[in-house]
Image: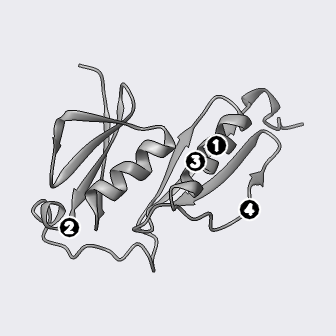
Amino acid sequence: MAKQVFINLAVKDVQKSMDFYTSLGFTNNPQFSDDAGKCMVWSKNIFVMLLSHEKFASFTTKPIADTKSAVAGLFSLSVDSVGEVNHILTNGLKAGGTEPNEMRDYGFMQQRTIEDFDGHTWEIFYMDISKFPTEQ
């Protein structure tokens, strides 16, 4: 079996969050979804589980972080072009996400950041490794 990544996020409104992630380009896998959680697919090996607070709490004894006021993690997704970065951010902003800072351009990588309704932070980036600075 291929190695896969499942990122589990506590969200206040599962359907509203599913709609937002759909606007970013994720698709829903109904086989692993119900009213309390939605499995959102980024690629064949990367999934985001959008879980109601009640369902999320059933997996841990720790309190759920308030990601609107504190960062619990930074999640990064690579794409094939700067145009795709901008397209995803435009769609996410139209769907109600927020962009906490301007695009960052590192020469070899361009990155934009978007937060969902619950404050989960996503960095969408394009990287051209051929432009990565080499040591002299």
Label 2: which secondary element: helix
The amino acid on which the numbered mark 3 sits, given as a three-letter code, is: Asn
The amino acid on which the numbered mark 1 sits, given as a three-letter code, is: Phe
Query: Disc 3 or disc 1, which is closer to the eye?
Result: 3
Q: Which residue is labeled 2 in the image?
A: 53
In whole angstroms, how far apart are the C-alphas of marks 2 and 3? 26 Å
In whole angstroms, how far apart are the C-alphas of marks 3 and 1? 15 Å
In terms of sequence position, does the residue under pointer 4 or pointer 2 come before the other?
Answer: 2
Q: Which residue is labeled 1 in the image?
A: 125
Labels 2 & 3 near each other (Cβ < 8 A):
no
Label 4: which secondary element: loop
In whole angstroms, how far apart are the C-alphas of marks 4 and 1? 13 Å
Q: Which residue is labeled 4 in the image?
A: 102
The amino acid on which the numbered mark 4 sits, given as a three-letter code, is: Glu
**Residues packed near mark 3 inside 10 Å, few (<14), some (14 to 19) or many (20 plus):** some
In terms of sequence position, does the residue under pointer 3 or pointer 1 come before the other?
Answer: 3
In terms of sequence position, does the residue under pointer 4 or pointer 1 come before the other?
Answer: 4
In whole angstroms, how far apart are the C-alphas of marks 4 and 3? 16 Å
Give the image location of residue 115, x and y in percent. 51, 62
